[in-house]
């Protein structure tokens, strides 16, 4: 065994370095020369202890990933049949992940036991900096559901039906109360079947209490599985535990995949120290969302740019600036061998970006402005998703069909935090001055979130909302949906055009028109200008601005390594390939109350002329750094 491995037990457990790599397949741990060039300090892997020790001796720690046991081990002796395996109402099995009985509590308990026992000796090895805890439900171990190969809910198995019935018995106690809530006679518990899917009414919402009950049970079970798994691992180690959360948290069919940020991060906080790995590092909206949740609940943020088969230079460049802007603790890179090839573009680009990220260290800073993303809306909408906020947040710093011609409300608002229903109910609006609900149709939330918003406005906050369907329906504590028009009663009369109404010490600004960047493109562009004016009037303008707004300026706060105020600029023009960069003249202005040394970091195709600061451009890395003293202004011209 290497000498370093023998000495490591004498010192404290290692800290997870700034840049790492996912290497869970044979032959995917990059060679030493590439690791050194990229400043890779750790690898997510399941290699044997001797190999992990040797890697540590060569400067590469481990985030240990324990392989998940197969369904044969998890089902052994439980007398389970195919009818017990996850399937939708038509018998279609899982499109990804295990074909197993994930709604059988015995299976989940066995999974937690096997994981705990496997990690009892491995998790506390001196070269292990953290432990990645895989969920037993999804394909890649992320905290979301799988769906059937037809996109359906996998809740028609025997254990799923039994679980749903037990949950209903706990909630209602007897069939009379259940029948009254559902508006129909339910003759027996065994007669209850999970709904096949949403049945939306004229407003696009499924308002049935049976559907609402089903959604609460469904999303609650995923949280229980996550909690059981983490609790089991926490019994055998005090090392940081890592959970991966993917794009389902805000994107396509969120209501069936689940993986909701606020409830998930809130639950993880019970098992700290915990790290949340956001696999959408290329999306600024996603990073502001998970970053805000981690800051609220005391969880460490990590980010992961998209990997195979969707590798793109565009996504990797966005990942660098996003990670710095939200104070990510580290960046972890997924690959299938690309990083073992010195001449591969992925290796070359992270040989540039890795050292740039490692040389700087920022911390997450909550913003005075926030955007509301309601995951609860995705439960009741016919399309099972809510893309309202992400579609308007940023037109190019996204993985969701980037289009530079679209509005970027996030830029007008200073790249604000993203808050969801659970976060708001738990007090996330404290200290905020402005909340925007970019509703495109029907924005639904819980009674707890509605009341938190109301009390915040009464105390002095400004709420901006769009469309007659915004908060027009509320999910009550008994899970029934109730009409709550006029912004859940916060307006005394329906909005006409743009309505401004005082409410307590605060105000409500309501637009009659809904916000949809395609259906109402001109309106959304107009509102973007009005939001810029509003943040100025409220005194919550961002620390820096860039004009024209075809580029984006991100305030990263203080760099702990240099002491400079760090800003990143996004000059991406097209998503490629190949990636191109904006040209022309850009003026950067900053809050006159800021003082001291500052630095701007960007990736550009060529060096600009610079007024107001000292610019340096590296033709090998394409990294542009500009340094100046605040207060001040910069002009960059290509």
Image: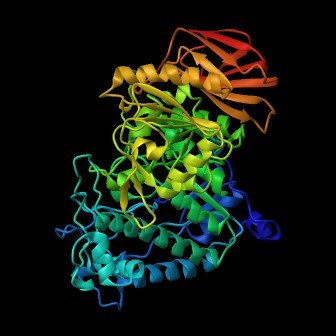
Q: Residue furthest front?
A: 492
The image shows residue 636 at horizontal and vertical percentages of 62, 11
Of residues 435 and 616, which is closer to you in this image? 435
The image shows residue 192 at horizontal and vertical percentages of 24, 78
How many callouts does the rendering have? 0
The image shows residue 488 at horizontal and vertical percentages of 45, 47
Say if residue 500 shows up in the picture.
yes
Say if residue 572 shows up in the picture.
no
Colour scheme employed for the rendering of this structure: rainbow
Q: Quadrant of the C terminus?
A: top right
Give above or below for 477 relative to 395: below
Give above or below for 571 relative to 455: above
Residue at horizontal 44 percent and vertical 79 percent from the top: 108
Give above or below for 155 relative to 149: below
Q: Is residue 327 left or right of residue 74?
A: right
Residue at horizontal 41 percent and vertical 27 percent from the top: 575
Of residues 534 and 327, which is closer to you in this image? 534
Q: Quadrant of the N terminus?
A: bottom right
């Amino acid at each position: 065994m290497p000498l370093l491995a023998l000495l490591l037990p004498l010192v404290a457990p290692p800290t997870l370095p700034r840049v790492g790599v996912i290497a869970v397949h044979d032959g995917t741990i990059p060679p030493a020369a590439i690791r050194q060039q990229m400043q890779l300090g750790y690898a997510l892997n399941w290699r044997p202890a001797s190999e992990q020790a040797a890697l540590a001796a060569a400067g590469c720690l481990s985030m240990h990933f324990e392989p998940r046991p197969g369904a044969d081990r998890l089902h052994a002796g439980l007398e389970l049949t195919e009818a017990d395996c996850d399937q939708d109402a038509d018998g279609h099995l899982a499109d990804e992940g295990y074909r197993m009985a994930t709604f059988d509590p015995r299976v989940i308990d066995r999974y937690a036991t096997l994981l705990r026992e496997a990690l009892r000796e491995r998790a506390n090895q001196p070269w292990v900096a953290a432990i990645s805890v895989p969920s037993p439900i999804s394909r890649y171990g992320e905290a979301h559901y799988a769906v059937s190969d037809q996109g359906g809910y996998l809740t028609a198995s025997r254990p799923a039906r039994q679980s749903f019935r037990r949950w209903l018995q706990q909630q209602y106690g007897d069939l009379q109360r259940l029948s009254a809530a559902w508006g129909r006679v339910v003759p027996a518990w065994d007669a209850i079947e999970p709904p096949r899917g949403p049945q939306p009414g004229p407003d696009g919402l499924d308002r049935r209490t049976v559907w609402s009950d089903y959604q609460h049970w469904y999303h609650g079970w995923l949280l229980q599985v996550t909690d059981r798994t983490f609790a089991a691992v926490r019994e055998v180690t005090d090392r940081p535990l890592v959970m991966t959360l993917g794009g389902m948290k805000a994107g396509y069919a969120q209501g069936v995949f689940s993986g909701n940020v606020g409830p998930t991060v809130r639950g993880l906080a019970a098992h700290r120290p915990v790290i949340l790995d956001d696999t959408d590092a290329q999306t600024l909206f996603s990073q502001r969302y998970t970053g805000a949740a981690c800051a609220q609940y005391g969880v460490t943020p990590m980010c992961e740019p998209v990997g195979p088969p969707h590798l793109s230079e565009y996504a990797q460049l966005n990942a660098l600036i996003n990670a710095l802007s939200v104070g990510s603790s580290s960046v972890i890179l997924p690959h299938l061998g690309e990083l073992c090839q010195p001449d591969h573009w992925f290796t070359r680009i992270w040989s540039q970006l890795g050292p740039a990220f490692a040389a700087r260290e920022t911390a997450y800073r909550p913003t005075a402005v926030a955007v509301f993303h309601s995951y609860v809306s995705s439960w009741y909408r016919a399309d099972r998703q809510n893309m309202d906020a992400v579609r308007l947040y940023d037109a190019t710093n996204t993985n969701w069909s980037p289009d530079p011609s679209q509005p970027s409300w996030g830029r007008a608002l200073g790249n604000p935090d993203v808050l969801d229903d659970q976060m708001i109910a738990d007090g996330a609006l404290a200290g905020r001055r402005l909340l925007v609900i970019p509703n495109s149709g029907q924005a639904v939330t819980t009674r707890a979130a509605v009341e938190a918003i109301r009390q915040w406005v009464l105390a002095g906050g400004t709420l901006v909302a769009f469309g007659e369907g915004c908060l027009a329906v509320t999910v009550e504590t008994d899970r029934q949906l109730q009409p709550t028009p006029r912004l859940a009663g916060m307006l005394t009369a329906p909005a006409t055009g743009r309505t401004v109404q005082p409410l307590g010490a605060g105000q409500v600004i309501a637009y009659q028109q809904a916000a949809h960047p395609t259906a109402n493109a001109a309106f959304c562009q107009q509102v973007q200008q009005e939001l810029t004016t509003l943040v100025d009037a409220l005194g919550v303008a961002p620390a820096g601005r860039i004009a024209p707004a075809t580029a984006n300026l991100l305030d990263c706060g203080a760099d702990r390594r240099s002491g400079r105020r760090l800003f990143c600029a996004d000059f991406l023009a097209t998503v490629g390939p190949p990636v191109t960069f904006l040209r022309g003249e850009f003026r950067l202005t900053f809050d006159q109350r800021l003082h001291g040394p500052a630095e701007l970091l960007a990736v550009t195709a060529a060096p600009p002329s610079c007024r107001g600061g000292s610019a340096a451009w590296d033709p090998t890395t394409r990294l542009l750094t500009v340094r100046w003293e605040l207060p001040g202004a910069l002009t960059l011209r290509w």
